[in-house]
Image: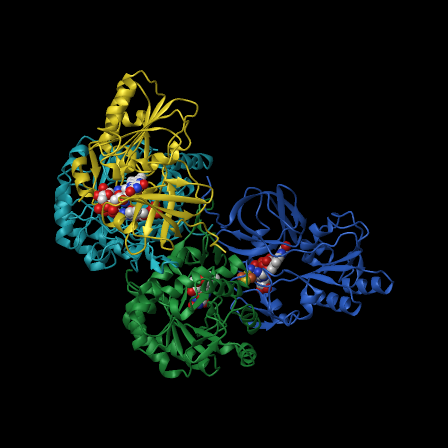
Chain colours: A green, B cyan, C yellow, D blue
Amino acid sequence: MTIQFLGKTLKNPMVLASGILGNSKDILERVHEQGCGLVTMKSIGPEPRDGHKNPTVIDLGHGMINAVGLPSPGHLNMENEWKDLEKRDFPLIASVYGGSVSEYQRVAKFVSTKKPDFIEINISCPNSEKHGMIFGVNPQSSHEVVSAVKKVINVPLIVKLTPQALDIGQIAKICEDAGADAICAINTVGPGMVIDIESKRPVLAFKKGGLSGPMIKPVAVRCIFDIYKAVNIPIIGLGGVTTGEDAIELIMAGASLVGIGSAVRYRGIDVFGKVVKEMETWLKAHSLSIEEIKGAAHKEAL
Amino acid sequence: MTIQFLGKTLKNPMVLASGILGNSKDILERVHEQGCGLVTMKSIGPEPRDGHKNPTVIDLGHGMINAVGLPSPGHLNMENEWKDLEKRDFPLIASVYGGSVSEYQRVAKFVSTKKPDFIEINISCPNSEKHGMIFGVNPQSSHEVVSAVKKVINVPLIVKLTPQALDIGQIAKICEDAGADAICAINTVGPGMVIDIESKRPVLAFKKGGLSGPMIKPVAVRCIFDIYKAVNIPIIGLGGVTTGEDAIELIMAGASLVGIGSAVRYRGIDVFGKVVKEMETWLKAHSLSIEEIKGAAHKEAL
Amino acid sequence: MMNPITDQKPIMLRVIEKKIESPEFATLFFEYAIPFKPGQFVMVWIPGIDEKPYTISYHSKNQFAITIEAKGLFSKKAITLDKGDLVGIRGPFGNGFEIQSKKHVGVVAGGCGMAPLATLAEQLDKNTTFIHGARTKDYILYPDRFDIDRQFCTDDGSFGHKGFVTDILEKEIASGKLFDMIYACGPEIMMYTVFKICEKHQIPCQISLERYMRCGFGVCGACVCGKQIVCKDGPVFNSAVLRDMKDFNTKALLKSGKDVDLSLYFSWRCK
Amino acid sequence: MMNPITDQKPIMLRVIEKKIESPEFATLFFEYAIPFKPGQFVMVWIPGIDEKPYTISYHSKNQFAITIEAKGLFSKKAITLDKGDLVGIRGPFGNGFEIQSKKHVGVVAGGCGMAPLATLAEQLDKNTTFIHGARTKDYILYPDRFDIDRQFCTDDGSFGHKGFVTDILEKEIASGKLFDMIYACGPEIMMYTVFKICEKHQIPCQISLERYMRCGFGVCGACVCGKQIVCKDGPVFNSAVLRDMKDFNTKALLKSGKDVDLSLYFSWRCK
Ligand SMILES: Cc1cc2nc3c(=O)[nH]c(=O)nc-3n(C[C@H](O)[C@H](O)[C@H](O)COP(=O)(O)OP(=O)(O)OC[C@H]3O[C@@H](n4cnc5c(N)ncnc54)[C@H](O)[C@@H]3O)c2cc1C
Ligand SMILES: Cc1cc2nc3c(=O)[nH]c(=O)nc-3n(C[C@H](O)[C@H](O)[C@H](O)COP(=O)(O)OP(=O)(O)OC[C@H]3O[C@@H](n4cnc5c(N)ncnc54)[C@H](O)[C@@H]3O)c2cc1C
Ligand SMILES: Cc1cc2nc3c(=O)[nH]c(=O)nc-3n(C[C@H](O)[C@H](O)[C@H](O)COP(=O)(O)O)c2cc1C
Ligand SMILES: Cc1cc2nc3c(=O)[nH]c(=O)nc-3n(C[C@H](O)[C@H](O)[C@H](O)COP(=O)(O)O)c2cc1C
Ligand code: FES
Ligand code: FES
């Protein structure tokens, strides 16, 4: 199931979503070994940041809610990790966030010198007061941050979008025009809130949090469908994927690669290999290839 | 559990959501008999409209997706229904939608002469090409439509909002300033899409549809929480309520009344009475009243 | 592996066999162990076309079938489907018939109304009184299917007696036959007449209604009839409910939700 | 009625009993039938404060307890909780100890590391070699709890021998005692020394690690240690895994995700 993506060869179309386990080279390597074609680091910010107090991640059964709060050592405090990653033998996305265009630019420029295979900018995270999401819902700021980052990096640029954008197809197109090489969608949905009625308090310390997992899959499919119609660059589709059938659904909506986050909880760290196997079984039973099903849901009536 | 709402006495705080069963006086009456304090008619539009082809409503297990497409006889073609409703002995919300400010105004003005207890304007429906949602995501158009409608009706005005608004608290405040007497939130989430991978097609005939039911409850809670902070008028909270505990959660977020839609599927048409009973049991066990728990989640740390 | 959360999207099935019942009817068979009670229905989705309710007309452990009368756009498309074609099935929905065993019962079928009664008839005693009518011979569904003897009739006399099923029913009752239950399905006016006859003679009856449907599970309100939700409380209703059912044989909702006289509703549906 | 969809939000429980174990330790009891394996932990939420992982230190059919050492902000708050106070519990999480019955095993506990070993010890033979140390007498947890004889030691000699648990373990092995398994929990440096001793003598061991945690179920990555996810693959690890575990006794992640030397991590945690 090897696949070409922005000039690199991946062993399969599975991607580890940012913020899931991606805290060190060792664990990223394990995820790759467990059958994941492309792994993403936890989003890297301009300053050291502890993130929010716990509770930060709650499983709701049909999905999760989280407000981890973008913890990061800060891009200048990751020397061990960069050194470890230099010697990697797997393809890597470095995810970057900032509080302003110049912060995005500064972090991305620095990270680019560390030679990840791709840089992803997270302009879509809802779990911090000032970081990220504001850029991804606004056409103009999306354009600014993408073109600013594109100028200073030497690896392909992926832009990660939020489903909160009123017209995610339009935002994607603007990012493409600004120089994005690929779109990643979606980040978490909402935000949502869960109140514990016994203590009468929001369960998350940050009160609100982004939704992920099975319950957001219909939103992910719709967003990917809209983006596929709007752009020509490839899409990393994610949101609620748990099975090979889910992955195929996102590919039919228009995804080239398929990310997994929350399902690591539901099916274990080897979910990547399992999903690849299920996709292979389905494709074989239907005598189809991934290329043949990509965007298939866009074809018109019988 | 009688409760005061905009000058009317309701037998309990439960509300039948618009678009659920509300197609005739008989069935609205049955819902009222089954324990629902306040019932809402299916949204009424300016022209006859068939809605979309089937499939229009699909149960996803943890919630539903629907694109019914605002079917309506049109406000001028409902004489039988209005005549039946004249003789009702239960409180009623008439829901109204339009494609322009003047259409909203025209329909609402006419409906007002039919003396429902309240008029709700649906500025939040995602399931039509041109109706509704556009108003509810934009501060200016929200203000225009609410103040235009307010001028021409003789009953209290409820405005129903969409969670797609970037800042639903801000929109609610604008509606309050424009004359709204209450806010109803939320309409469906998304939109989403479900693709059947065997036929490679979106399952809904309209392709996209709004999400409802248990999976959207965290979004509803967050929206109600935000609106409660922003306005002083009462809130009809709804979205994913299935149990008495769910209803209490929405009330703690700030709801005065609690609506139910999809749960009619999950627990039957008598879900209203069941939820009221569960609320009573919980309140009694905790020696609390509804008034005491309203907005309780807003109080600060221990 | 299935998604860990049970969803109820259409289950995609291929037609495994097609049977032309007559020039007007075709039956499509599917391999799937569907839970089932006679009188229940499924929502049938033809991708790209539409989705409509159809009775389960044949049922066994691993198979079921639907029988379609060619009427409008959808059903005319449906009868062209053949072996290997893919359709989506949601359901079963509805309550189904309540079967009272070891009693003498009557079955009154009119036209396509035979479909929901077929699997019921298979569970009834051989001595059941079975009256089956249709417009013409071509509309007599399953002429050779059952162990039970049938009294046939057609509007034009092309098969069996010339006349209406309700005439035969009246005659049977007049001849002194005692019924513990009458099951009926067919045009609403026919069912209404059956109901009136039953009321007169104090015979309990169960009839199966038809209304425009969307969700199939009692949420959207498209199919309401008086205080009843046809897809959920029905489609089968008994005498006690029918007595209070204001819109029975009088009113139905169009797709737009507009309530109209039944005649108007049926002229729309037979356009 | 519960929501038809299983959720895994914190279950809100009231403290039903509080036991002051020593000036430094308190145990909180809850009434709840929690599934359980010795060594598993729960996430404990004090509304308005924070949520942290604690071992299940007592367990019976309808009750369980956690034992807290007063260290920082959260744990100092936790030991002030009393009967009737509400906390949220998520879990149990983690793998727990693998118990090999009918063999001669050793248990080595250091300080609060006694907590996860307590319910394990209750399932072991009376002839188990049980070594239990702490800084001072006040940090000896459950001095009277078990049937098994313990060899106590403290850093200052205030209770039992003066010295380290690892010295006693070495002595036991040197005296010819044969172990089929050693279970250990305590400061990481202590566990590392136990592991090294076991390796030298080819005794398999299981130790229970501690890292900063968020989700508790293997998603967020806060607790990773080498290739292992402590909350999910652990907290108990056996010799085979420990041999390859690069960060064992060397590195840990701070809340920000920064990887630091273990000494730095512990100086932060003991601030
Ligand atoms: C519970 C139930 C069971 C049924 N079982 C059968 C069956 O076994 N065999 C069979 O041939 N037909 C059955 N029908 C009718 C079937 O659903 C279609 O209405 C019929 O096939 C005509 O559809 P059409 O699109 O070809 O005609 P159209 O020209 O589209 O419509 C004709 C008319 O059919 C009715 N109709 C259309 N769509 C629906 C809908 N979604 N729900 C209810 N009525 C609708 C309306 O009155 C409409 O005006 C059943 C209907 C119901 C409600
Ligand atoms: C699997 C597991 C089981 C544990 N069982 C017990 C137990 O039975 N009894 C007990 O007293 N303690 C136990 N702990 C430690 C406990 O979770 C707290 O770390 C400890 O109580 C100190 O918290 P504090 O807030 O009071 O101190 P703080 O001053 O906040 O922190 C002190 C240090 O504790 C560690 N810590 C803080 N938060 C966490 C966290 N969420 N996860 C892991 N480590 C953290 C960090 O090293 C931190 O620097 C366990 C930890 C883990 C990982
Ligand atoms: C605990 C958690 C932490 C996350 N952290 C990040 C992050 O740092 N950066 C980011 O771009 N996305 C983050 N996400 C979003 C995921 O990458 C992903 O977009 C989202 O969870 C949807 O995918 P899923 O349904 O497969 O989980 C996080 C998600 C979760 C559940
Ligand atoms: C089948 C269906 C039809 C709906 N139609 C309408 C409508 O006409 N007008 C409206 O304001 N909301 C409509 N809604 C939205 C509901 O009123 C409600 O806001 C939403 O479903 C969330 O509540 P729930 O989770 O309890 O279903 C519809 C929802 C469903 C499921
Ligand atoms: S078809 Fe929706 S309620 Fe019956
Ligand atoms: S605490 Fe989240 S992965 Fe371990």
Image quadrant of ligand 6 equals bottom right
Could you tell whether D42 is left or right of A70 in the image? Answer: right
- A183 vs B201, nearest the viewer: B201
Task: Residue B69: give x, y in percent of width and height.
Answer: 24, 51
Examine the image and state in which quarter residue B1 appears.
top left
State whether residue C197 appears in this view.
yes
Task: Residue C12: give x, y in percent of width and height.
Answer: 39, 53
Could you tell whether C2 is left or right of B134 in the image? Answer: right
- C110 vs B251, nearest the viewer: C110
Task: Residue B199: give x, y in percent of width and height.
Answer: 36, 58
Decide: is D191 above or below D44.
below
Examine the image and state in which quarter residue C233 appears.
top left
Could you tell whether C189 is left or right of A297 in the image? Answer: left
Task: Residue B33: give x, y in percent of width and height.
Answer: 31, 31
Q: Residue at x 73, y 66 (%)?
A: D195
Q: Residue at x 40, y 45 (%)?
A: B249
